[in-house]
Each structure stands twice: as C-alpha cells, then as structure tokens.
Image: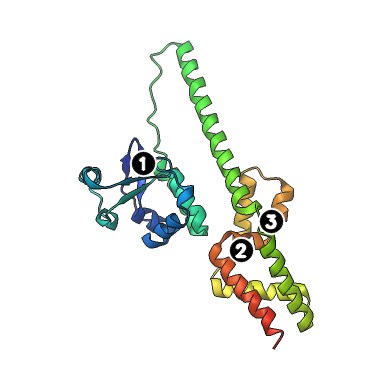
Amino acid sequence: MSQLQPIEHQGQRVLTTSQLAESFGTDARRISENFGRNLERYKSGKHYFVLSGNEKRSFLDRTQIADSSKNAQLLYLWTEKGAWMHAKSLNTERAWEAYEMLVDDYYRVKETAIDLTGLSPQLQLLIAMEHRQLQIEQKQQEHEQQLATIKETFLQRDDNWRQKINGMLNGAARRSGKSFRDIRTESYQLLEERGKCQLNIRLKNLQDRLADTGATKTKINETNRLDVIEADARLKEIYTTIVKELSIGTLV
C-alpha cells in the first residue's frame, strides 16, 4: 500500500474513493458500484461525506488532493466506518488486511501525550480514570460492531441456497457413482481454479475473525467452506454455476 496523503474533514480523517480503492486492491468503479447497491445501509456523516460546488472547491484548495477523485462532480470522503462497510462488501483478504492497516496507521491518529506532572496526584488520577473509561467504551463499541457484522454476514445463512447446492451435489454423486464427498471436493477444486482463490486460507481467516470477536468455539468449529463462499457474492455465483454444471454433466 502506497503512502496515503492524510486528509481530514469535520475533525476526522477520511479517504477519497480513489485512495480507498487503491488501498483495497480494486478500482474506484467497484467502490462506487458497491455503494450504489447498498445505499440504504450507508449514512451520511457516519460512513461518508459528499461535497459539491463551493464546499468541494474549498476542500480541494485546502487539501490539494492529487488523485482522480477531484475531477468527479461529487467528491465522496469515506470515514473509518465507511471503509469497514466497503471491506465487508469486497470481502477479500486484501481488503480486510488493508482495513486493519488503515485503522492502525491512518484513521486513528496517535494522540500526543499530555504532561500531567504539574497537576496534583488527585487530578492526575481522575484524568487517568476518565481516559481509561473512554478506552473501555471504545473497545466495547468496536466489539459490539464486530459481533453484529459476524451475525449479519456469516451466521444468517441462506438455507434455501444451501439445500439446492447440496441437493444438486447429492444427485450428481448418485448418478455418477461417486461419493458425495468426492463430488463436493471436486466442486471446491473447480471453484479455486475459476475463482482464483484458496478456500482453506479464507476459512482460516474467517475462523480467526470469529474468534477475535468472541464467537463460541462450537460456532467457530461449525464454520465451513460454504460460509466462505456464501459471504462472497462473486464466489457464490461462480460456485452455483459449477454445481449446476456438475449436476447437468451427470445427465448427459
């Protein structure tokens, strides 16, 4: 990831669409398309800011942005929470890794230490307690957000889709004389070839994220490759086609 030009709006760090796309290993068009498809999930002022007219010109004069976003009629600026929404939509290893780096190295600017030595011990203690309480509240908010994401993205399964997939695989196995496990393994291998992905690595990353957010050991162990596939719209579409081909192939 190249060095990002720090820009701020309304007291917080933000990224342009071009900066976000470059960080996540995609292009600005994909970011805009994902935003358009999930517009109702985004809130202005929370996930993004949009500038136009004089406000946009004033912002560009102040920040001297040097990427292609400045040429757009509307200038979108993405907050940390907005970047998280886009990482969730892309759901690639590159995007999640980049998001973590952005949180640590860009969005959350290191606070300048304040010299408290001239204050009374009682006042120093009160300040330390207040600072600690703010840290606890921030961690709790992050934890709750992560749990909500896990529940929404991974744990609410499309049972109808899974039933259809397993039904087609069962039928293909029965008609071909192969075991269900062999047919399923073949389908995963074909997906890795066509989708240019490694399911085992993605599954391990998903299980690690579940563990980090406090999911139960049972839930982590129950997570499987179908969870990985279902969470990625592109892989889900490719895999559905593969399973249909396997099922049809046994009828020829």
Q: Nearer the viewer, residue 38 or 204?
A: 38
Residue 149 percent location from the top left of the image: 57, 47
Closer to viewer: mark 1 or mark 2 = 2
Tell me whether the residue at label 3 lies in contact with that at label 1, contact meaning CB atoms closer than 8 angstroms: no
Q: In the figure, residue 250 lies in which quadrant?
A: bottom right
Q: Please name the amino acid that badge 2 sits on.
A: Ile
Q: Earlier in the sequence, mark 3 or mark 2?
A: 3
Is residue 200 shown above or below 58? Answer: below
The crowding category of the residue bearing disc 3, from other C-alpha atoms within 10 Å (few below 14, some 14 to 19, many at least 20), is some
Numbered circle sitting on residue 223: 3
Quadrant of the rendering where the N terminus is positioned: bottom left
Q: Nearer the viewer, residue 77 or 188?
A: 77
Residue under numbered circle 2: 229
Secondary element under disc 1, as helix, strand or loop, is strand
Mark 3 → mark 1, Cα distance in angstroms: 35 Å
Residue under numbered circle 1: 13
Mark 3 → mark 2, Cα distance in angstroms: 11 Å
Residue in the image at 48% along x and 24% along y: 131
Residue 233 visible to an observer of this rendering? yes
Q: Earlier in the sequence, mark 3 or mark 1?
A: 1
Query: Furthest-front residue in view?
Result: 40
Secondary element under disc 3, as helix, strand or loop, is loop
Q: Please name the amino acid that badge 3 sits on.
A: Thr
